[in-house]
Image (cartoon, coloured by chain):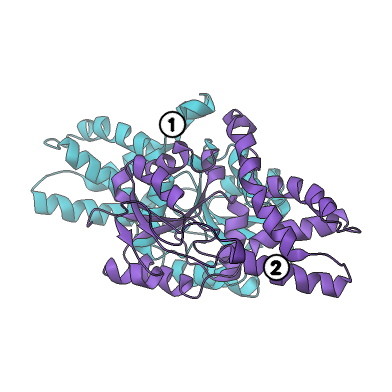
Chain colours: A cyan, B purple
Amino acid sequence: MSEIKALMFDVFGTVVDWRSSLIDNFTAWAARKGIKGDWTALVDGWRGAYMPSMDVIRKRPESDFVILDDLQRQSIEPLAAKLGITGLSPADFDYLTKGWHSLDPWPDSVSGLTRLKTKFIISPLSNGNVALLTNMAKYAGLPWDLVLSAEVFRHYKPDAETYLGAAKILGLTPGQVMMVAAHNNDLAAAQALGLKTAFVPRVTEYGPHQNRDFKADGNWDYVVTDFNDLADKLGC
Amino acid sequence: MSEIKALMFDVFGTVVDWRSSLIDNFTAWAARKGIKGDWTALVDGWRGAYMPSMDVIRKRPESDFVILDDLQRQSIEPLAAKLGITGLSPADFDYLTKGWHSLDPWPDSVSGLTRLKTKFIISPLSNGNVALLTNMAKYAGLPWDLVLSAEVFRHYKPDAETYLGAAKILGLTPGQVMMVAAHNNDLAAAQALGLKTAFVPRVTEYGPHQNRDFKADGNWDYVVTDFNDLADKLGC
């Protein structure tokens, strides 16, 4: 494994706890504003709209790529209406959308990344857009060397262009890059293209709705308990 | 100036001392290898080929963009031949080209950037490609939040797409972004597009061949002595 030069991290669920962060943020914000609503249902429903909204973009030419912030902004209004949350202004919807920029890391994320950075190039490789990932890094103290995103390659994961684009833009072969994720399907896509793979379970990501990714279900190069365990195993 | 959110740095000459770094690197390397040559002339000539090589790309469609590493690799072979430096293998030319990935920062660069990072998003906005800038940051300890490059926007500075692309990809207006450079022409291009500007003189960049940029010659928002002076003036 000495050939690995760069570690690419899935972000939502792997590095940050999006569900608890958003529910806590929106619940406190709504209480201050006096807006009633089921914020847990909103967050779960919003995440549910995530894959279908990217699938629409996947069928379009690269020149029509739409960043995740804009997809999230489009899906939140009908979802709020469906859940009977009323009285939200355009600025309120913008606030909710920007919530994805300020997500809390898992307890091991910052310490593990800081150790891994001493030996490897570390970057997100996320469907989040560059601004979202940059603002999140500032908020959460994520010490990325650079910020790679579906936006840079104009393709959402698991499209091949995203994984192969990450290796190419760093001047590396796919085998010199390792994808780190809490999602087996992300790793399967990366492995099929020649990248190395590391699985980190995040079994509370979806709260009571978690129904997969409790454990590794592929032949990944590393299966670790958290980012510090990965740092141990990679000799950082 | 409280509206500034992100600082974009020119790199070659502004953040790193490319000329002394390359001359020292190549002179020591050639001595070890027993290769004779005028390495100072090679470095100065190579930098001289920089603008013309980008101008060729500027006239092509975006899909034909060529990264700086490849332009440098193309220009070094005929230049070495012209200077009578013989016996270099393809691997030697690759080594010389990779020299641009390992350049030493000016004495104030790391400390100044570290201070500026506490208050602003900091990124290179360089004609160097992403791999070059990432490897340089690892080598020199440059604490970028992200790595933006002409490569990401498929346009070399001073094309408008690069400056405006940097603002857009961060979700900012041009006026929320400040270009920091040791080159008045870089700042002029940025200012014309609505970006803020800061000039930092680097009067030894070109050694005895320096014939411009000894001082600010535009109406820049900040004129500072070095990056720590900029941090002082921006309240970091």
What percent of the width, then of the height, locates residue A224?
59, 66
Q: Which residue is mark 2?
A: B23
What amino acid does circle 1 point to? Pro
Contact between labelled residues 1 and 2, with CB atoms less than 8 Å apart: no
Q: Secondary structure at mark 1?
A: helix
Q: Is residue B115 left or right of residue A111?
A: left
Q: Work out how far the residue at label 2 is from the one at label 1, CA to CA, in angstroms.
A: 54 Å
**Residue marked by disc 1:** A52
Q: Nearer the viewer, residue B46 or B176?
A: B46
Mark 1 neighbour class, 10 Å CA radius: few under 14, some 14 to 19, many 20 or more: few
Q: Is B21 drawn above or below residue B176 in the view shown?
A: below
Labels 2 and 1 in the same subunit: no
Left or right, residue B59 beside residue B190: right
Residue at x-position 47% and y-position 43% = A127
- From what the image shows, is residue B104 above or below residue A217? below
What residue lies at 37% left-to-right and 71% top-to-bottom?
B115
The answer, for residue A220, to whether it is visible in the render is no
